Amino acid sequence: MQHSLPWRVGVVLALFAPLANAQTPPAAPKPAAATAAAPQPAYSAGALSLPNADPFPSTYVRPTARPLVIRNVNIFTGAGPLIRGGAIAVQDGKIIAVGATVTTPPNAEVIDGNGRYVTPGLIDTHSHLGVYPAPGTAAHQDGNEGTSPNTAQVWAEHSVWPQDPQFPRDLAGGVTTLQVLPGSANLFGGRSVVLKVVPSRSAQGMKFPGAKYGLKMACGENPKRVYAQRGPATRMGNVAGYRAAWIAADQYRRKWDAWLLKREGEAPARDLANETLAEVLRGNILVHNHCYQADEMMQMIDIAKEFGYSIRSFHHGVEAYKIADVLAREGISGSLWSDWGGFKMEALDGVRANLALVNAAGARAIVHSDDASGSQRLNQEAAKAMAAGRAAGVTVSEEDAVRWITANPAWALGLDDRIGTLEVGKNADLVLWNRNPLSVYARADRVWIDGASRFDRADPAQQWRTDFELGFVPRNDGRNK
């Protein structure tokens, strides 16, 4: 009996099955097999405009070196007050300790600083070494692609000549990192490259691993002069040129971003100039803007806001002191000379306290060179600017002045997490000076990059000679000894 109900249900269902089947609409036909997706074109990497593409990657390799300890030295860390009679320890290319005393790692080279001074490796945000190498013949003039107001498609690294004998002289001046920029003939001059000052067979072997590219822009008289007959011929023409280029770049970026999201259909055509500007709009390239006058810098800030990008540093900025508060508010650094000015109309209103006034307003002040000789003496340039500021009644400490050639330029290059200060974990780029580096008599005795010795004034074997000089320049540089 306990199975009677299921039995009855089964019978009922069986009796009514034909009726039920008759009322059931015919089954829908099975859908046809899905059409195979249209084959997508196969693209090589070079056919696609990819964000942060790196077709010419750094090949720099940090050399192995013994651990290092320098004792009994005065240390400008770039991150705090001067440490007198301190010590610094380095291992595997990094700073592992800095302070009054440090523990010596096994097998370390120990140097008695004997009261000398240590700073971070100096950094030049505005160099043309390699693209305007020595000797300065026409055959070597590769720094200005003055063929169009917008040459954002060119990359400075493709003009860098690693055998430029100015590189080792920069190193002897304590410079360990520099940004090589294309020239300032154009509204958009092209991409910069950040280099370590080390010997190499190629520019790629000098490239700072992971450093962002910069975009060189120029305003004012240079583009006006170069393109006077072709346009833009006025400052308002300059601004129209910037805006038109950014409009095109924004359209290019949106088109590529949409295609990269789905990767369907034919990819848009690449455009190298728009690609560089699009990377600025994506935040992957830092803008370094040649600009002298205060009013033009204000205009450039407005243009940047119109199109949604940031300016990392104004270069030359002879009138930066007039807008020092604006630079501080906008987070824009000033890459400035200590005392250059007056050599053309837009540079007429310079003051020697420029760096000090920008610093006092809370903006990042930077000593840059734009000159092969000045780059070898960045410490003296900083000292001159410090003295000029003090003479004008502006408070400037020696620590401030050292930051103008170390920590602040590191920030301008987006490398402040790796270089520019002597802190644990940072790259061991060091300079041992024979005295206070803000003295006119100061010289770099030793220079290390990533903890490896790259220059020793007392050891000719530790003095880089380029291939260009071999066989022509005597070991004593032609001096009578």
Image (spheres, rainbow, N blue to C red):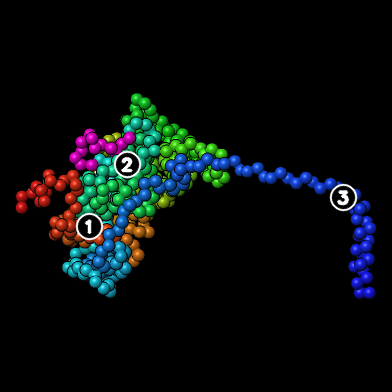
Residue assigned mark 3: 24
Task: Identify the mark at residue 356; answer none if there is no mark.
Answer: none
State yes or no: residue 108 in magenta: no
Q: Residues within 10 Å of mark 3 (few under 14, many from 20)?
A: few
Q: Earlier in the sequence, mark 3 or mark 2?
A: 3
The alpha-carbon separation of the residues under discs 1 and 2 comes to: 25 Å
Q: Quadrant of residue 273?
A: top left
Residue 145 appears at what percent x and percent y? 33, 35
Mark 3 and mark 1 in contact (Cβ < 8 Å)?
Answer: no
Which tag is nearer the camera, tag 3 or tag 2?
3
Q: Is residue 475 left or right of residue 451?
A: left
| Residue 40 drawn above or below residue 424 | above
Q: Secondary structure at mark 1?
A: strand
Q: Earlier in the sequence, mark 1 or mark 3?
A: 3
Residue assigned mark 1: 454
State yes or no: residue 144 in magenta: yes
| Residue 247 drawn above or below residue 63 | above
Going by the numbered disc 3, the residue's amino acid type is Thr
Q: Secondary structure at mark 3?
A: loop
Q: Earlier in the sequence, mark 1 or mark 2?
A: 2
Tell me which secondary structure the magenta stretch mostly adopts: loop
